[in-house]
Amino acid sequence: MLKGFQSAVNLRKWDLGLRPTLLAVSGGVDSVVMARLFALAGFPFVMAHMNFGLRGRESAEDAQFVADLAQELGVECIAEKGDVKGYRKRNGVSVQMAARDLRYEFFRRVMQERGIERWLRRIMQMTIWNIFLSICIEEIWMWHGGGYGRSRGM
């Protein structure tokens, strides 16, 4: 799986090994897989986690999980609490818009403070997630006796 990830990164000419990347890590499967793949590949990165507290105890547990993951991977994790409700009232926007605005501002500020030139946007996360799933499906296909020249249903 790691080889497939590294090949996909090289094929797309992403220079992930040269400069640190800010990874937005929510604690969900896609961002955790992404962080683990970056760590296994040896790509330099910093994790960022925004806790809006909208889900009470679950939000706090996610924040702790992300902090523990960063410690396990040996990388820095910058976490911040965002006041979505206050932002929403002040700016007259939806919860989703308030969360997005606060999150993007947080990422920009962290990047500026740390001299990081890029952060992994959701589209790139989904690309990496699709690469991961493709690799898993290919490995399962090959394991079950499939092959590139064969055509059969799963």
Image (cartoon, rainbow, N blue to C red):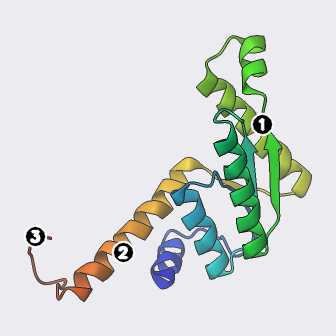
Mark-to-mark CA distance, 1 and 2: 35 Å
Task: List the single residue furthest toward the right.
Answer: 113
Residue 153 tag number: 3
Which residue, given by chain and number where applicable, does mark 2 sit on? Answer: 136
| Label 3 Cα neighbours within 10 Å, binned few <14 / some 14-19 / many ≥20 | few
Badge 1 vs badge 2, beta-carbon distance below 8 Å: no
Mark 1: amino acid: Glu
- Is residue 2 rendered to the left or right of residue 98? left
On screen, 117 above or below 90? below
Instruction: Please give the name of the residue rendered at 52% of the width and 59% of the height, measured from the top-left corner.
Output: 29
- Is residue 153 rendered to the left or right of residue 14? left
Camera-near label (3 vs 1) is 3
- Locate residue 79, reporting x and y percent: 80, 50
Instruction: Please give the name of the residue rendered at 24% of the width and 86% of the height, measured from the top-left corner.
Output: 142
Which of marks 2 and 3 precedes in the sequence? 2
On screen, 13 above or below 78? below
- Is residue 71 rendered to the left or right of residue 137? right
Mark-to-mark CA distance, 3 and 2: 16 Å
- Locate residue 103, reporting x and y percent: 72, 38
| Label 2 Cα neighbours within 10 Å, binned few <14 / some 14-19 / many ≥20 | some
Quarter occupied by residue 120: bottom right
| Label 1 Cα neighbours within 10 Å, binned few <14 / some 14-19 / many ≥20 | few
Which of marks 1 and 3 precedes in the sequence? 1
For the image shown, how many numbered marks are present on the structure?
3
- Locate residue 145, reporting x and y percent: 17, 89
Instruction: Please give the name of the residue rendered at 68% of the width and 80% of the height, measured from the top-left corner.
Output: 42
The quarter in which the N terminus is drawn is bottom left
Q: Is residue 71 visible from the viewing direction of this image?
A: yes
Secondary structure under badge 1?
Answer: helix
Secondary structure under badge 3?
Answer: loop
